[in-house]
Image (cartoon, rainbow, N blue to C red):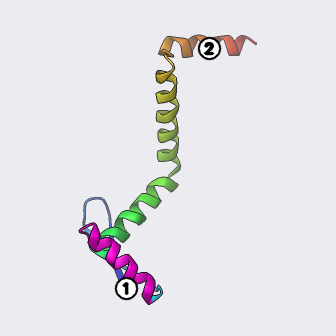
Amino acid sequence: MQAVIGSGDNKMATQMIIRIAPEVKDRFSKLARMKGKTLSQVVRELIEDYVKEQNVGTYIDDLWSRIGGQLRSKGVKQRDIGTAITGARKR
């Protein structure tokens, strides 16, 4: 199986050859077709998602977004956070 890997702008700059068991490739191919995608498209998406997940900056941004969402769902306002930080610094 050959997978052509590119960046988000869809310019394919390099190739990557991987070896997998034939039965895994067959199942993978069927699953990709069920989604209306090529093997290369699915491999690119998987690799791009993996790289994004491993990016520390992206991870931290996502973490802050999740924390912010949880705080908002509990009714916490931005001024409440400032007050909590000031109180913690006084201790």
Q: Which residue is mark 1?
A: 1
* Region in magenta: 22-37
Instruction: Measuring from the top left, give residue 2's x and y in whole percent.
Output: 35, 83
Farthest residue to the right: give it.
91
Q: Is residue 13 at all visible to an observer of this figure?
A: no
Instruction: Measuring from the top left, give residue 15's x and y in whole percent.
Output: 35, 79
Residue 12 painted magenta: no
What is the three-letter code of the residue carrying label 2? Ala
Counting residues from the start of the chain, the first of labels 2 and 1 encountered is 1
- Residue at image coords 46%, 34%: 65
Count up the numbered dots.
2
Residue 33 painted magenta: yes
Q: Which residue is mark 2?
A: 84
Circle 1: element type: loop
Find out whether the residues at labels 2 and 1 contact each other: C-beta distance under 8 Å: no
What is the three-letter code of the residue carrying label 1? Met
Circle 2: element type: helix
